[in-house]
Image (tube, rainbow, N blue to C red):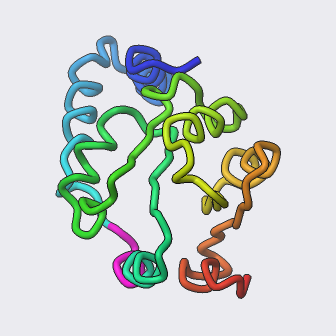
């Protein structure tokens, strides 16, 4: 299961694990939580805008689906061109995290008939590719050491 509370607790636990020498990690956690909630602290890969434009002009419905927490929605709404994407799903709002097949099923349920032939593109082979295939989706692995997003979308990799 995934909820906003669970995801926040997971991040708190991560900070405690990474910085065991700190007697109180709460201030560090709060600072990092705030920092990574601001869109200006995120950067898109350079090819993302052109890829989105190409796929939108071809009539594809773009959806973001991530294990990131609820902050993702506000971040995407402030980043050009992600702000145009109508559907942004995070595991905490879906109730399940990837690689749980229910993550994908919940997206299907929420989008209904708008999701005709879903394609998951992700950088995690198990959570994004294998799990999506188990859910009956198409999937492409984005390995930035081997290819850029355009090559993956074009089926060149």
In the rendered image, which quarter contains the N terminus? top right
Q: Quadrant of residue 146?
A: bottom right
In the rendered image, which quarter contains the C terminus? bottom right
The residue closer to the viewer here, 156 or 24, is: 156
Q: Quadrant of residue 23?
A: top left
Residue at image position (64%, 37%) is 98
Q: Is residue 25 above or below residue 150?
A: above
Q: Is residue 51 above or below residue 29?
A: below
Q: Is residue 29 above or below residue 73?
A: above
Q: Is residue 64 above or below residue 66?
A: below
- Image location of residue 5, percent across then percent down: 39, 14
- Image location of residue 115, percent across then percent down: 57, 53
Write down the region rendered in magenta: 44-50
Residue at image position (23%, 43%) is 74
The residue closer to the viewer here, 109 or 74, is: 109
User: Along the horizontal axis of the image, is 17 left or right of 41?
Assistant: right
Q: Is residue 46 magenta?
A: yes
- Image location of residue 148, percent across then percent down: 56, 81
Residue at image position (50%, 71%) is 60
* Residue furthest front as drawn: 113
């Amino acid at each position: 299961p995934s909820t906003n509370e669970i995801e926040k607790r997971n991040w708190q636990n991560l900070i405690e694990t990474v910085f065991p020498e700190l007697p109180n990690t709460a201030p560090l956690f709060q600072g990092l939580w705030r920092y990574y909630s601001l869109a200006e602290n995120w950067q898109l890969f350079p090819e993302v805008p052109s890829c989105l434009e190409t796929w939108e002009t071809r009539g594809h419905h773009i959806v973001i689906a991530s294990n990131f927490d609820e902050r993702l929605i506000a971040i995407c709404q402030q980043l050009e061109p992600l702000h145009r994407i109508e559907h942004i799903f995070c595991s905490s709002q879906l109730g399940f995290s990837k690689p749980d097949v229910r993550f994908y099923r919940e997206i299907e349920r929420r989008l209904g008939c708008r999701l005709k032939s879903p394609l998951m593109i992700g950088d995690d082979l198990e959570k994004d590719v294998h799990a999506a295939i188990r859910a009956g989706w198409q999937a492409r692995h984005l390995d930035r050491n081997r290819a850029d997003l355009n090559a993956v979308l074009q089926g060149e990799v």
